[in-house]
Image (tube, helix red, strand yellow):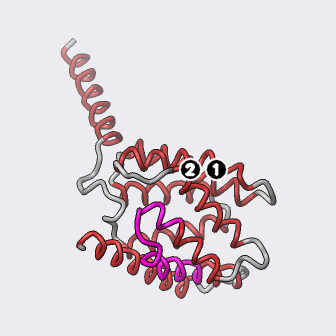
Amino acid sequence: MNRRWLTLVVACVAVAVTAYALTAAPAGPRSLRAFDPDRTAALELEMWQAYYAKQRVRLFRLLVTLLREQYHYPWTTAATEGFHLARAAATFGDATSKYEIVLPDLEKGYATARQWLGAGFEPGRVARAELAWWVARRTKGQNDPENVGRLIAEAYALLYEAPFDDMLKPGLLRAEAAAMRDAQAGAPDWPTIGRLLTESYRELHANLSKAAAD
């Protein structure tokens, strides 16, 4: 009898610990602007590699990790938003037209972020701005890095509620990294692409930090 009670107690404790691990948020501020630029760039580089290799499980895992680290989500919240954003990316990757099909997932993902972070951005506007630069990248005549970079900057300005001019250089650097990947689709120079992403996120972080200090 005692053994049965001990087994039950151990099982209950294990369930409680697991539930806490899944629902507890990691230490740190709930802020869009508080992130490690080098770590963010490294995770994005791996996400790009997974995306183009159509490794969807890996893409989802990396995205959930990024969301938890960047936004200090509990695992459950990171998984919920990650599901919608990863599905949007996978759906877009397979689509050849009617790209707006991904908007509901993008909007749901950004709505989760706004609620958790207490941010003031509009999820629908951010979702449409995000999709705009995705589409531009694969549209002839619109896919030059300058145009794509400006579109990324517009999405950043909406998401971070920041001046467009402060978002422009980070956007252009990220667009340059994306253009290099597209031009070298057969054998991308991932180290150089990674350096451009790192420079982009360092510039973004610096500009956001400067704006917060002013």
The dominant secondary structure in magenta is helix
Give the magenta-colored segment's residue range: 155-177
In the image, is 191 to the left or to the right of 140? Answer: left
Measured along the vertical axis of the image, is residue 69 above or below residue 111?
below
The three-letter code of the residue at mark 1 reads Leu
- Residue 185 spot, x, y in % from top left: 71, 79
In the image, is 141 to the left or to the right of 213? Answer: right
Outermost residue toward the left? 2
- Residue 188 spot, x, y in % from top left: 64, 83
User: What residue sits 51% from the left and 50% below the top?
Assistant: 123
Which is more N-terminal, label 1 or label 2?
Answer: 1
The answer to the question of whether label 2 and label 1 lie on touching residues, with beta carbons closer than 8 A, is yes
User: What residue sits 23% from the left and 23% below the top?
Assistant: 9
Measured along the vertical axis of the image, is residue 161 above or below residue 49?
above
- Residue 110 spot, x, y in % from top left: 49, 50
In the image, is 203 to the left or to the right of 134? Answer: left
The three-letter code of the residue at mark 2 reads Gly
Front residue of this view, candidates 103 and 11: 103
Disc 2 target residue: 124
Specify the quadrant of the image occupied by residue 151: bottom right
Disc 1 target residue: 103
Per the model, the C-alpha gap separating discs 2 and 1 is: 8 Å
